[in-house]
Amino acid sequence: MIKGRVKRISGPIIRAEGLGSAGLFDVVEVGEKRIIGEIVRLERDDAVIQVYEDDTGLQIGAPVNSTGRPLSVLLGPGLIGTIYDGIQRPLEALFKQSGAFMEAGSRGEPLDTQRTWHFVPEASLVEKLRNGETVEVVPGLVLGTVKETESISCKIMAPPGVRGGSITALCGEGDYTIGATVATTSLGGEIPVAQWWPVRMPRPSLDRLSPDQPLITGERVIDVFFPLSKGGTAAIPGGFGTGKTMTQHAIAKWCDAQVIIYIGCGERGNEMTDVLTEFPRLQDPRTGRSLMERTILIANTSNMPVAAREVSIYTGVTLAEFYRDMGYHVAIMADSTSRWAEALRELSGRMEEMPAEEGFPAYLPTRLAEFYERAGRVRTLSGQEGSVSIIGAVSPPGGDFSEPVTQHTKRFIRCFWALDRDLANARHYPAISWIDSYSEYAEELKPWWEKVNPQWAQSRQEALDLLKREQRLSEIVRLIGPDALPDDQRLVLITAEILKNGFLQQNSYDEVDMYCVPAKQIRLLELIMVFHRRALTCIKLGAPLPKITSLPIRENLSRLKSVVKNDELGGLEDFEREMKAGLEELERSYRDIDGLSLREVVS
């Protein structure tokens, strides 16, 4: 163990002498309380350390001991349902030790070392060993499984980097603690139930797959207009009170990822309290059990040590890669990356580094890239398919999307869900702007959606074009009023209103509308666009707009989302027949005016 002494203290940044032979990013223990820190810079015999705990009372000359290993997390059964801080200390266990206020130097085992887990060895391995066959040790080799929760089975695998030799012994079915050895190798190696992994090192995979499978969220504005793929990256920027956290909560509950990791990074304590109290009560719509049975929470609020906020997102993505390697689809909710960037700025200032724009360090884009590029849909070392999708909230001051964190984030994400304050103030949920948002996954996801409904691409593009036309017309309406517009342009305003109320807006308290299956999503949009096209035909035939709006179609279209249930889509077909019948009757009454046929009018 390499030992040194504290030489200088500047908040969470400490300079220690005597650690010149230590390694960069080694974990150190500082002072009598053994405060956890990490070496972030080496200068001859001195080391610059950022500490992850409160160092109040620390004095010059206090001892510093290097552990000789990088900051790592313990990976194994028992992670699901646990609440950690940024360096994987279990907050519930620490609360029992020291109460509501965590003391510096507090320790807690990341996983319960006393609890036993029922291990079931891989049947194919047992058969091969019984027959005397050689089983080569390769990274990702599945040795057996542990039932972690009713929803998740944890696979015990040979860790990355372990290669060579063969399995000489494999534990039989039984109950074991996380420290137990489940397999031994011919080279004398032992493979335990739980294994350590450095948080700043991405876990390897065999191959990266194309992002052609959507992450279904049940939110129509996301799934249809701005879809996210499994293994994709998305950002939700918005000012205070626009609904970033609410949107992430809804995605966490309803998306078709099998494991959810929620990182509360520098957010207010009351917001994390809402998560901690709400998630255990939420029911997983797929299993009917508690949502916490497939969720890991990492809480690092704004009043906790700032350095731990910086490392919390790496802890979260490492846990996500662990479950990805088992073949699960994992979704990370990072709330918010702006607070994480502020932690970088504070630490950079303490280390007297040259600031870049708005005081952020020059390496801010690099750190953002390191985080978002760990997302992806991959072929794992064990040959399965898994993914990590990252959805990061961004909190630009004053809702200014031109600030550095938002602008740099846009370089590394392919899905941008911009929240609009006017929509939020109008109680339009989700308040995602259809003008400022975009998704670069739409073209890659087109084949998947066209299997659901061949009209997806056409209806989606028509609707987006119509909403952009409506925005331009709204500026004219503010000046001269809607009555000055011709009927075909006023129809654009009416259809856009139906789109906003009957498609884009969702009621999270409505049991029918809180989640929408893909088939219903695209059929709702298709019906609205069919209405627009048929109504436009009637106008060209000479029908006045009031004749069209007097039909009950307009109101019924807006209410359809809450009337037709996800498993009763036949109601949409019934409505389409009624709508077409009503509009066709109106067409017939004007068809022969001026001697024009319907075909001539349409052409």
Image: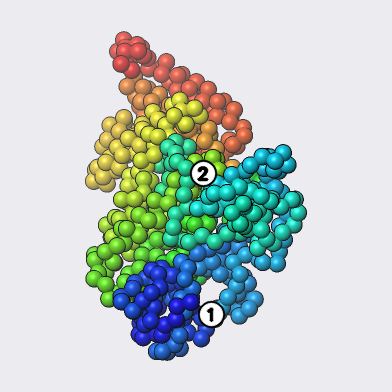
Residue 63 sits in quarter: bottom left
Residue receiving disc 1? 105
Q: CA distance from mark 1 to mark 2?
A: 37 Å
**Marks 1 and 2, the one that precedes in the sequence:** 1
Viewer-closest of 550 and 119: 119
Q: Residue 155 placed where, x, y %?
A: 62, 49
Circle 2 Cα neighbour tier, 10 Å, few/some/many (<14 / 14–19 / ≥20): many
Q: Is residue 305 above or below residue 203?
A: below
Viewer-closest of 250 and 496: 250
Label 2's element? loop
Residue 600, disc: none
Residue 500 sits in quarter: top left
Q: Residue 370 placed where, x, y %?
A: 37, 56
- Residue at the limit of the structure toward the right, as seen here: 174
Label 1's element? loop
Residue 394 relative to residue 255: left or right = left
Residue 284 showing in the rendered view: no
Viewer-closest of 377 and 473: 377
Q: Residue 276 placed where, x, y %?
A: 58, 64
Number of on-image labels:
2
Q: Residue at x 43, y 21 (%)?
A: 586
Q: Amino acid at mark 1?
A: Gly
Q: Is residue 80 above or below residue 358?
A: above
Residue receiving disc 2? 380
Residue 40 relative to residue 451: left or right = left
Q: Amino acid at mark 2?
A: Thr
Q: Residue 3 placed where, x, y %?
A: 44, 81
